[in-house]
């Protein structure tokens, strides 16, 4: 009986410590995402280089994938990242109708050319516009992905969803979770 009580107490203690750790991690993450200045100040201390008014183009096999301009950037070689302030990104599609993204901040993962933007993200193409809080560009799959709620609008379509994946090579876009919207009777495929 004593062993059983000891095991219960030990398991409860481990569970309490795990929950405490999760709460601490969650609170820390929320502070950083809701106050990007905290993240910027931490990264500026670690940064190997600070740049103002930066412009970069990513290419693969001689084909432009994206072009980016930002107000400023901090390069952190140890983490293989470049932190961007107010990035303006143009992602090139094969049919010439490019995606233009603007955001409050972004990160380029220098070892892969993966790009993530966040904070008031607005993306526009020739046909539509979408708004969300974060978008990630994966150069390996040539996809734009948003795991935050998104709204899409055009002259004939209005749509909301929890997540979006846009395949740039095929121009096929997938929406998941709580998808709702309206399509005008004038809509043409």
Image: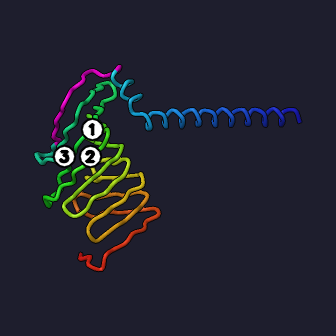
Q: Nearer the viewer, mark 1 or mark 3?
A: 1
Residue at the spot of label 1: 86
Mark 1 and mark 2 lie on one chain; the one further toward the N terminus is: 1
Residue 53 lies within the magenta run: yes
Q: Which residues are magenta?
A: 45-58
Query: Which colouring convention does the figure follow?
Result: rainbow
Residue pictured at 17% horizontal, 37% vertical? 56
Where, by quadrant of the figure, is residue 22 drawn? top right
Screen quadrant of the C terminus = bottom left
Residue at the spot of label 3: 66
Residue furthest front as drawn: 155
Left of 20 or right of it: where is 164? left
Screen quadrant of the N terminus = top right
Tell which of 167 and 116 is nearer to you.
Answer: 116
Residue pictured at 27% horizontal, 38% vertical? 86
Element at badge 1?
Answer: loop
Crowd tier of the residue under label 3, counting other residues whose Cα lies within 10 Å: few below 14, some 14–19, many 20 or above:
many
Give x and y (percent) for residue 137.
29, 48
Q: Nearer the viewer, mark 3 or mark 2?
A: 2
Distance in Å between CA atoms under marks 1 and 2: 7 Å
Residue furthest right as drawn: 1
In contact (CB < 8 Å): disc 1 and disc 2: yes
Where, by quadrant of the figure, is residue 60 drawn? top left
Residue pictured at 37% horizontal, 72% vertical? 182
Residue 44 lies within the magenta run: no
Crowd tier of the residue under label 1, counting other residues whose Cα lies within 10 Å: few below 14, some 14–19, many 20 or above:
some
Q: Is 180 situated above or below 90?
A: below
Residue at the spot of label 2: 102
In contact (CB < 8 Å): disc 3 and disc 2: no
Crowd tier of the residue under label 2, counting other residues whose Cα lies within 10 Å: few below 14, some 14–19, many 20 or above:
many
């Amino acid at each position: 009986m004593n062993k059983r009580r000891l095991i219960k107490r030990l398991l409860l203690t481990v569970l309490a410590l795990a929950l405490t750790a999760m709460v601490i991690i969650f609170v820390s993450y929320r502070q950083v995402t809701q106050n990007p200045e905290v993240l910027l100040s931490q990264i500026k201390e670690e940064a190997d280089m600070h740049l103002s008014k930066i412009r970069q183009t990513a290419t693969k096999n001689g084909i432009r994938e994206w072009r980016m301009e930002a107000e400023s950037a901090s390069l952190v070689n140890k983490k293989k990242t470049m932190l961007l302030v107010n990035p303006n990104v143009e992602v090139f599609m094969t049919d010439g109708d490019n995606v233009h993204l603007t955001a409050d901040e972004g990160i380029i993962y220098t070892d892969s050319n993966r790009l993530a933007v966040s904070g008031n993200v607005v993306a526009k193409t020739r046909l539509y516009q979408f708004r969300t809080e974060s978008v990630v560009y994966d150069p390996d799959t040539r996809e734009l992905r948003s795991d935050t709620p998104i709204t899409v609008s055009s002259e004939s379509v209005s749509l909301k969803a929890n997540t979006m994946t846009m395949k740039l090579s095929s121009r096929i876009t997938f929406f998941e979770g709580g998808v709702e919207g309206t399509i005008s009777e004038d809509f043409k495929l």
